[in-house]
Image (spheres, grey):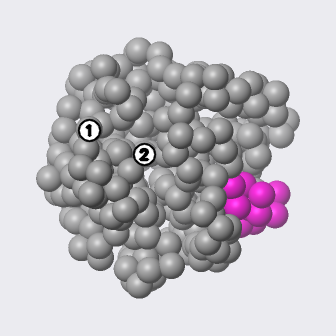
Amino acid sequence: MNYSRIYLLVLMVALVFSSCKEDKKASTPPVATKPKTEVKIPKFERDSAFNYVQKQVDFGPRVPNSPEHVACKNWMVDQMKALGAEVIEQDFKATAYTGDVLNGTNIIAQYNVDNPNRILLCAHWDSRHISDHDPNEANHTKPVLGADDGGSGVGVLMEIARNLQNTPIDLGVDIVFFDLEDYGESQSDNINSWCLGSQHWAKNLHKPGYKAKYGILLDMVGARNAQFTMEEISMSVAPTLMRKVWKLGQGMGYNAYFLNDKTKAVIDDHLFINRIARIPTIDIINKPKGSETGFTKCWHTQCDDMSNIHKNTLRAVGQTVMATVYKENNGQL
C-alpha cells in the first residue's frame, strides 16, 4: 500500500468516481432475509489473533518468489481449511515494476458457498521486498517482516474465521487474502504497480458472476494507538457502510481507534475491488495524525516486527468487523 502525491490521489479518486460509482444493479445481490434465530456476536479473542500474526512472522518476510512466501501460503491454506472454509488457491503470475515475474497466490476462503447473499472480507498477506522508508539507508534493500503491514489484517480475519466455524451463521462470507499487494513502485505515478493480486482477482473472479453486497479491507490494523480514519475512496463508494462500521466500533468503546476525521485516498486493494469488480469496499487502515508518510513510523521499515503489534488494537478492529458480520447476518445492520 502506497502514499503518493496529492495530485495522484485526486486522479485515483476520479477514476473511482468514473468507473466505480455505486451501481445497485451491478453490485447488490438479492436482499438477505432475516434468519429465524438471531446469532449472538462472539467475543473476539485478541490473544488468538496475535498468535496468527506471530505465526506468519515466524516464516520470515513473505516476499514473492521466496521459500518463506511458499511456506506461509501453504500454512494459510491448511489453516483456513481447518477453520471450516472451502478454499480456492488462485495462482497467477505478474510482472513487477522491476521487470521480475512474480509468482502469486490469492487465497479465497468461503463460508456458506451456496448462499447468494454474500459479503467480502479481505487483507493482503505478502510483505514488502524492500525497507525503502527505513531511517537507516543501509536497510533500504532489506525485506520487511510485515507484522503490521500484511500480518495484522490476516491475523484478525483468521480469528474471525475461527468464530465463523465455532458460531456458524447463514450469511455467505468470503475471506480473501490478496498476494503481491506490496511490490509497488514508490515515488511514482504508476498506480498499477501496486496491488497486483487484487487486480488479478478483480479481473478473474473466483466464481463467474460473483457478487458481494459490500467488502471490508483490513490493512495495518495492529499497531499501538492506531487511528482509523474515514479514507476518501471508502467514503466515495460506500459512505453508509463506513459510517455504520465506525458507529459500531465507537459504540463498543473503541472511539479512540475509529475517528470521524476524513483523510485523503490511498492506493490499496480496495481501489481495484471498487474500480474493476464493482463491489463497494471500504478500507480500515491506520493513518495517524501528523505522520510525514501518512502511515506509522514502522511502515516499510525494519521495525515492522512483532514489537509493532498491540493486542488491544487487534481486538478493537476484530470485534468491530465481527459485529458487522453477525449483525448483517441477523438483519440488524
Q: Residue 115: where, in percent of width, then height? A: 67, 58
Q: Residue at x 53, y 58 (%)?
A: 183
Amino acid under label 2? Asp
Mark closer to the chain start, 1 or 2: 2
**Residue 13 image-quadrant placement:** top right
Q: Which residues are magenta?
A: 198-209
For mark 1, give the secondary structure.
Answer: loop
- Residue identifier under label 1: 297
Task: Count the labels in the image.
Answer: 2
Q: Is residue 286 above or below residue 291?
A: below
Do the residues under discs 1 and 2 have CB atoms within 8 angstroms?
no
Amino acid under label 1? Lys
Q: Residue 38: where, in percent of width, then height? A: 44, 43
Q: Tell me: 324 left or right of 253.
A: right
Q: Residue at x 29, y 76 (%)?
A: 59
- Residue identifier under label 2: 219
Residue 204: say if magenta: yes
For mark 2, give the secondary structure.
Answer: strand
Q: Residue at x 27, y 57 (%)?
A: 138
Q: Is residue 246 above or below residue 171?
A: above
Q: Is residue 32 above or below residue 10?
A: below
Residue 155: say if magenta: no
